[in-house]
Amino acid sequence: MSEKVSTLDVRQRLGDMLNRVALRHDEFIIERKGKPLAALVPVYRLEQMREFARQRALEMSERQKGRNGALSDDEAMRLANEAKRWARRSVKTGKRRRP
């Protein structure tokens, strides 16, 4: 579960938060005026999300190839961006769900 913190909290407690992320693998959602702005997560988690997004883009690409032949560069970029948005949405909600 991610802990929500304000930008002011981050300024005041950054050292403590970094220790918690590094040692306990805690995650923080940083908010400004009550709206999510950024996330502070362990590096391994970020790498997992990126790898998942790459795999998802490749899966979608393979499905498209089976139907229409090779993808154009624009189609491949659109699929990659869709996978990235999906991965980012998953981080915000704290769960994985298929689009």
Image (tube, rainbow, N blue to C red):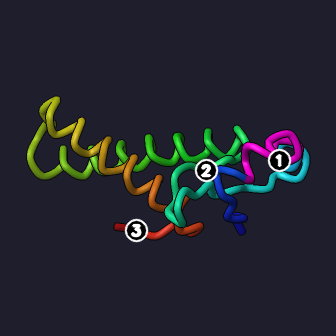
Residue marked by disc 3? 98
Q: Disc 2 to disc 3, how far (Cα)?
A: 21 Å
Residue, disc 2: 39
- Magenta: main secondary structure equals helix
Residue 55, horizontal then vertical, whole percent? 45, 45
Kind of residue at badge 2: Ala
Q: Position of residue 63 (x, y in %)?
A: 25, 52
Q: Quick one: which residue is furthest to the top in this view?
A: 73
Instruction: Identify the element where label 3 is drawn.
Output: loop
Q: What is the C-alpha distance between the residues marked 2 and 1?
A: 15 Å
Mark before the other along the chain sequence, 3 or 1: 1
Residue linked to disc 1: 13
What is the magenta range? 9-19
- Mark 2, residues whose alpha carbon is within 10 Å: few (<14), some, or many (≥20)? some
Among the 4 quarters of the image, the one containing residue 91: bottom right
Can you tell which of label 3 and label 1 is closer to the viewer? 1
Please tell me which residue is depicted at 26% across the width and 45% down the height of the picture.
79
Circles 3 and 1 in contact, beta carbons < 8 Å: no
